[in-house]
Image (cartoon, coloured by chain):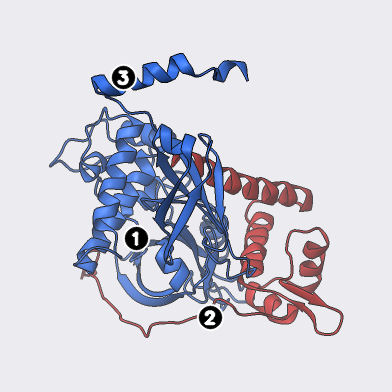
Chain colours: A blue, B red
Amino acid sequence: MPVEFKDYYKILNVPREASDEDIKKAFRKLARQYHPDVAKDKKAAEEKFKEINEAYEVLGDPENRKKYDELGSQWRDGTGFQPPPGWQQGRGQGAPFSEGSFEFRFGGTGFSDFFEQFFSRGGRFDDFSDLGDRQKYGDGQAGFARRGSDLESDILVTLEEASKGSVRVLTLQRTNRKTGQARTQTIKVKIPSGVIDGQIIRVPGMGNEGIGGGSTGDLYLRIRFAAHPDFRVRGADLYYNLDLAPWEAVLGTRIVISTLQDRVAVKIPPGANNGQQLRVRGRGLVNGQSGEKGDLFVVLNVVVPERVTEQERELWNSLSRLSDFNPRNS
Amino acid sequence: MKEPRNSDQESTQELQPVEHSTRAAYTIEAVADLAQVPRRLIVLYCKHGLVVPASKSPESGWYFDDRAIHALRRIENLRNACGMNLTGIKLMMHLMKEVERLREEVRFFHRQ
């Protein structure tokens, strides 16, 4: 089944030759604008936010971006999408839901079919023996029973959803390759508060049907955190990049930042260095499996002004004459 | 008479939504039944560190969570569909875990 090509550059509103930094900036700007927690029209914003996230997931990773550029080299706006030769739609590459005589499509996971087909994190365990077994033993032959194979899919979850929990409605469409008959199931899945990235949620009995009276396989949903415009995640810890003016780093200051739960004032000590990390205890995510409470790390990033006035230049000059500090000599 | 072509036919069947507790704990017997893996094999996989019980106590025995069922299904898939032996499975499970961890690291640094 052909999938619709996604123009990720257009979604992020950047030219194809945009630098990695431009892409990051564009993502942050749009993600702040459409973040479901801040936008007025939540439903529309959520769709847009997911789309932006998907685009950033691909263009924000150099490997994925290269792959995407190759994939889309022949594609022009308004034309149908055919992957270039070598990008088979069969098993092994692409079409991750080919499962014997059925084809699967998920809805509501937060990822498009295009993404699922070419950029999904993988680890989906297709049962390669499925087709062979059916041919060898025939469907439902007496004395042979085998459990249906499992399905896996990623599900995009925002950090806010992960900390508060949510209920998601997914659709799973199974199409019989031979008859073309499609059946759509609606699944309501509870995302418990405290889920972590990579965690597996098992939905029993939503996989492939068994053979010869064997039980039905399961559906495994893998939690995938949406990129947040302000925070990066590592385990249960959050990382926040805080930009500082050179004098703020030297003299120290106090800055109020928004965490996922509240606002905290962070005291920047005098003589703070670029890359230095300040820990705000307990303001990270909660790992529901271990009960561990993560921290928020504020990563200092000293930014030098791009332009200076005549007077400022004079002051920096005075400073350079006065100071005996030499960063290459310490 | 020719069979009617039904390749474009689509029947949509709305089923009752399924809600599933993600914090469930299972005994080894329940896991054996859910993952369709014999109990003795589960014990063997645990011995080799391929599956880890969520809790373990001399009084109440072993309890497993959904992660264990997922791991068992994956192991069974490697064994049956890919024809791997225990050594191969151990290596594969280790590598899959490592790849997952490294991917996370790469994502973290790209977003810096």
Label 3 residue SS: helix
Residue placed at 55% from the left, 20% from the top? Answer: A327
Q: Mark 1 lies on which chain?
A: A
Q: Where A159 sits versus A61, above or below?
A: below
Residue that numbered label 3 is attached to: A313
Residue A193 versus residue B59: which sits nearer the camera?
Answer: A193
Mark 1 residue crowding within 10 angstroms, few (<14) / some (14–19) / many (20+): many
Amino acid identity at mark 3: Arg
Rendered image quadrant of residue A214: bottom right
Q: Is residue B23 left or right of residue A108?
A: right
Mark 3 vs mark 1: in front: 3
Q: Where A251 sits versus A329, above or below?
A: below
Label 1 residue SS: loop
Residue A169 in the image, given as x and y percentages of width and height:
35, 74
Q: Which chain carries label 2?
A: B
Residue that numbered label 2 is attached to: B21
Residue A19 in the image, given as x and y percentages of width and height:
32, 29
- Give the spatial CA distance, label 3 vs label 1: 50 Å
Residue that numbered label 1 is attached to: A110
- Give the spatial CA distance, label 2 vs label 1: 21 Å
Amino acid identity at mark 1: Gly
Residue placed at 38% from the left, 31% from the top? Answer: A66
Amino acid identity at mark 2: Ser
Residue A58 in the image, given as x and y percentages of width and height:
37, 42
